[in-house]
Image: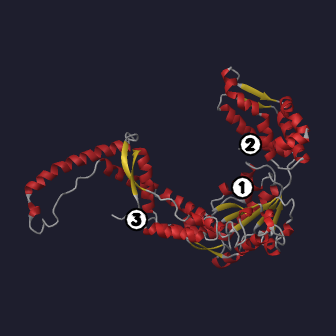
Amino acid sequence: MPRKKVEIKKDELQELGLNEQTPREIVEELNRHIVGQEEAKKSVAIALRNRWRSRKLSDDMRDDVIPKNILMIGSTGVGKTEIARRLAKLVKAPFIKVEATKFTEVGYVGRDVESIIRDLMQIAVRMVRQQKTEEVKEKARENANERLLDILVPEPKKSQNPLSKLFGGGDNDGNEDKTEEPKDNSKAGREFVKKRLEKGKMEDEMIELEVSDHAKPMVGMFSGSSLESMGDNLQDMIGSLMPKRMRKRKVTIAAARKILEQEEAEKLIDMEEVAEAAVTLAERSGIVFFDEIDKVATRGSVGGADVSREGVQRDILPIVEGSTVMTKYGPVKTDHILFIAAGAFHTAKPSDLIPELQGRFPIRVELKSLQKEDFEKILTEPQNALIKQYKALLKVEGLELEFKADAIGRIAEMAYDVNEQSEDIGARRLHTLLEKLLEDVSFDAPDMVKEGKTKISVDAKYVDERLKEIAKNRDLSQFIL
C-alpha cells in the first residue's frame, strides 16, 4: 500500500527561515560567546531583524527590500569568524562560510564562485529535509517496526495456483482447515515478538538485513571546476538510471531499526516538495560569509599569484548584485541573500576592491584590536572560555586546575605585549600561551594523580617561571609564540 507523502506548508517554511529574536536579544546571545566588538554585533543583529521585518511586508514591497550587505574590517583573531560561526548556530536559516582565496576567475584552475550558491542550496535542502524527517519520525518508527516484525516472523504465504479458481480448485474445505491452524500460530508468534520489540528486549540480537549499496561518485573528476554542476547532474542522472544494488548485512536489531527508520522517512517525504521549499528558503533567508576578502582586493593583475584576483571580484559581483544560479534543485535567485564579507586589510584597503563590489557592501564595521582587559574577559567569561576548557580536560584525568586572579591578569598582559611586539594575531595568542604554560602539567597529569596529587594552582609566579623568558626574548618568541 503506497504511503502518503508529507506536504510542506508555507507557514512552516517561513518559520524555518525566520529568527524571532529582537536585535538586543541577538546581541545578548552573541555576548555569551564573544567579548567586545559591540558595533559588529549590532550591525549583524539589525541585518537579521530586517529579514524578519521584510517578511511582514506586502508581497509587492517585499521584493523591493533587499538586504544591506556588511563588510567587517579587523585584524585576525578579533572575532570576525567567531561572530559568523555563532550566527550560524543562532539563525534558523541556510548559512555558509567560504574563503575568498579558494575561488579563481573563470578560465583558471580553481572553484567556480557559483558553487557557493550550490553549496548553500545543499544546506537548505538538508535543513528542510531534517525538519520533515522530525515530523514523520513517529510514523517512520512504526513502519520500521513492522518491517522488523516481517523479518523476524514472516507472514505465511498462500501457495495457491492462480488458475485454481477458474477450475474450482480453491473450494476445498479440507485445505482451508489445514491453513487455518498455522495462520493462528503465526499470528500469536507475531504478537509475542511485537511486544518484545516494543519493550526493547531484543535490541542486541543479530539479524540479516538487506540494504542498498551506495556506489562511490563516478564523476569526482569534475569537483572544484566550473564543470562542477554538470558533474552533479550527470551523477544524479546515472544514479536514477542504474538499478539499486543491494547487499546483506548482519546488524543488531537496534542498528537495523535506525536504518529502516531512515528508509521509511525517505518514503514518507516528497523530495520534489523539499527541493522547492529549499529554493525558497535559500533565496529569502540564505546568508553567505566571505572570509579573507582582502586577499583578492588587488587592482590590476600583475601576473603570478595575482593573475585572477580582480577576476574573482568580477565573478563575485553578479552573485552579490543579484543573479540566477542554476543548481540541480532548480534556479536560485541571489537578490535577497545576505552577504557578509570580512578581512584584515593589512596590506590592502577596502578601496582596493573594484568600485562596483564596494558599493554592494554599504555597511562597514571596523573591529577593534584587543586590549589587556579584553584578554582577561576572553579567558574567563564566555561559555567556551579557554580556562574552562583546560579545567574540564584535566578534570577527566582527576586533576583539579585552579587559576588565581593574578595569573589571569599576567597571561592577558603577556598576550597583549607579544601582540604589540610581533604579529598581532588577536585572541589566538592566548591559545599558544596557555598551551606552552600548561605543557608540563598536561604531560604529567596521569602520573601526578597516581602519586596522589589532585590539585594544581596557577598564580602569577607560576606564569612568570614558564613564560617570562620567552616573552622577553623577541627572537625566541617569534618561533614559540
The CA distance from mark 3 to mark 2 is: 52 Å
Kind of residue at badge 1? Glu
Query: Are the two marked residues, 1 and 3, in contact with CB atoms closer than 8 angstroms?
Result: no
- State the image quarter where residue 211 is shown: bottom left
Q: Residue furthest front?
A: 304
N-term-proximal mark, 1 vs 3: 1
The CA distance from mark 1 to mark 2 is: 21 Å
N-term-proximal mark, 1 vs 2: 1
Q: Which residue is mark 3?
A: 243
Q: Residues within 10 Å of mark 1 (few under 14, many from 20)?
A: few
Q: Position of residue 267 (x, y in %)?
A: 42, 62
Residue 284: image tag: none
Q: Which residue is mark 1?
A: 25
- State the image quarter where residue 45 is shown: bottom right
User: Residue at (31%, 44%) from the top-left corner?
Assistant: 193
Q: Position of residue 116 (x, y in %)?
A: 66, 66
